[in-house]
Amino acid sequence: MKMEQEKVAIITGGGSGIGKHSALALLAQGYSVTIAGRREAKLNDVIEKIGDDSKIMSVVTDVADPDSVGRLFAKTIERFGRVDLLFNNAGTGAPSIALEDLSFEQWTSVLNVNLTGAFLCTQHAFRVMKNQSPMGGRIINNGSISAHVPRPNSSPYTATKHAITGLTRSCSLDGRKYNIVCSQIDIGNALTEMTSKMENGVAQADGSVKVEPTMNVQHVADAVVQIANLPLESNVQFMTIMASNMPFIGRG
């Protein structure tokens, strides 16, 4: 069901994978969408695929840079007038190596994108949403199964995804007075460029390497739309969507 009033969404990490498919799904629901990412070519590919840029724009963005995030929101407001939805989707990981062998740079690069980037985008969204009319909006944070349980050799990524849960809870509380709601969608084994390696096997907690089930990424995009289309009086605080038979409850 399409919404009655046109809304505006910003999606970070919008040039590929979950971000790209979510952008396409939201466009189909009548949203105007800004896709943000570091790779201009990937962003352009999304718009070329659509073939009509009347309701979508791209902004090259480094979510770990406050000035870059500021430009993202300023350009969105200049083009579309407001921001109703922020999907904090940008993310990265570190090499799957022993914790003691990780460099400081590998640690901070993951924190900068996954956590600081989500905070900066959320902060700008708050500033915009509380001052627009009608006031308010929705923020959806891309968590992960790793927000619950880790994979082997994943301390930077797992730490940031646990932290995203704290950010989600805090924003849900702090946003109440501005009619801003915040959700977290924890995704497991959606088939994208990032997870394609799973077809060759993934390290397990018992030291073995196994091929894991995956799911169509479109199911994630549909879930994002489901959350986004709720009225602001209702919220899906946390959602877990995953390949049905992937290791989760038994992980570790």
Image: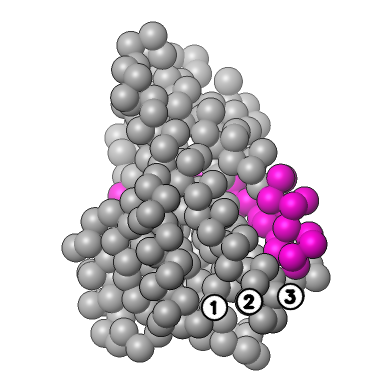
Specify the farthest residue to the top: 100
Q: Residue at x 50, y 55 (%)?
A: 121
Q: Residue at x 39, y 45 (%)?
A: 64
Which colour scheme appears in the figure?
A: one colour
Residue 36 image point, x, y percent: 36, 62
Is 122 or 227 nearer to us in this picture? Answer: 122
The disc at residue 82 is: 1
Mark 3 element type: loop
Q: Residue at x 62, y 60 (%)?
A: 126
Residue 10 image point, x, y percent: 47, 67
Q: Which residue is mark 2?
A: 132
Amino acid under label 1?
Answer: Arg
Mark closer to the chain start, 2 or 3? 2
Mark 2 or mark 3: which is in front? 2
Q: CA distance from mark 2 to mark 3?
A: 17 Å
Residue 56 seen by the camera: yes
Instruction: For the N terminus, give its image quadrant.
Output: bottom right
Is 115 or 133 nearer to us in this picture? Answer: 133
Q: CA distance from mark 1 to mark 3?
A: 17 Å
Amino acid under label 3?
Answer: Pro
Is residue 56 on the magenta stretch? no
Magenta highlight range: 169-193
Specify the farthest residue to the left: 41
Mark closer to the chain start, 1 or 3? 1
Instruction: For the C terminus, give its image quadrant.
Output: top right
Q: Which residue is mark 3?
A: 231
